[in-house]
Image: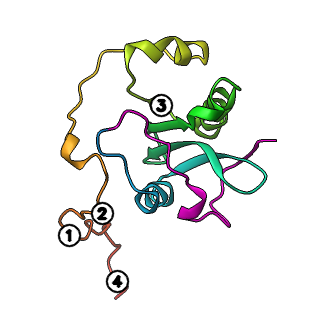
Amino acid sequence: MITYTDSLADVTSDDLLGGFFVGWLHPPSPQTHYQILVNSAAIVLARIADGTVVGFITAVSDGISCAYIPHLEVLPAYQGRGIGTRLVRQMLAKLRHLYMIDLVCDPAVQPFYERLGMRPVIGMVVRNYDRQAGALVRPNQESPPEEPQPPAPQ
């Protein structure tokens, strides 16, 4: 039995078995995979009875107008059971209040996403394959600009 959740409660990197990121030259470790989930704006997980995650989808978003879906993964042994379809449907429902929801995929999987209401567009990307494992490198840690404050009462 597969259950679906949008919570990381009681999930650890031990619940993220190897086998995700098929075909990646430098797949993230289970610990980095967990951090990907933690740092995502939205997630949906597919889990089996023992708590093991067998599929997941993530989104990054500004929470106002747009989101990007960077990851949809189902362990090979669980593919073909509708898990990916359910993960995408649940994520699209979570993000339906936004103007745009984008993802980039290979042409071979475009029909899958088209069946779920998405349409192909032309886009551009940069891929740094040497960073594919997702080592936790932090960009310049400058603080974001502060919002303007009203003048203090006199």
In contact (CB < 8 Å): disc 4 and disc 2: no
Distance from the alpha carbon under mark 3 to that under mark 1: 28 Å
The foreground one among 130 and 18 is 18
The foreground one among 67 and 58 is 58
8 part of magenta stretch = yes
User: Which amino acid is tagged 4?
Assistant: Ala
User: Which amino acid is tagged 1?
Assistant: Glu
Marking on residue 136: 2
User: Is 107 displayed left or right of 79 in the figure?
Assistant: left
Query: Which numbered disc, 3 or 1, marks the residue that appears first in the sequence?
Result: 3
Q: Range of the magenta residues?
A: 1-24
- Residue picked out by circle 4: 152
Of circles 1 and 2, which is in front?
2
User: Is 83 displayed left or right of 100 in the figure?
Assistant: right
Marking on residue 101: 3
Q: Position of residue 67 (x, y in %)?
A: 45, 39
Where 134 falls versus 129 (above or below)? below
Of circles 3 and 2, which is in front?
2
Quarter location, residue 31: bottom left
The foreground one among 61 and 19 is 19
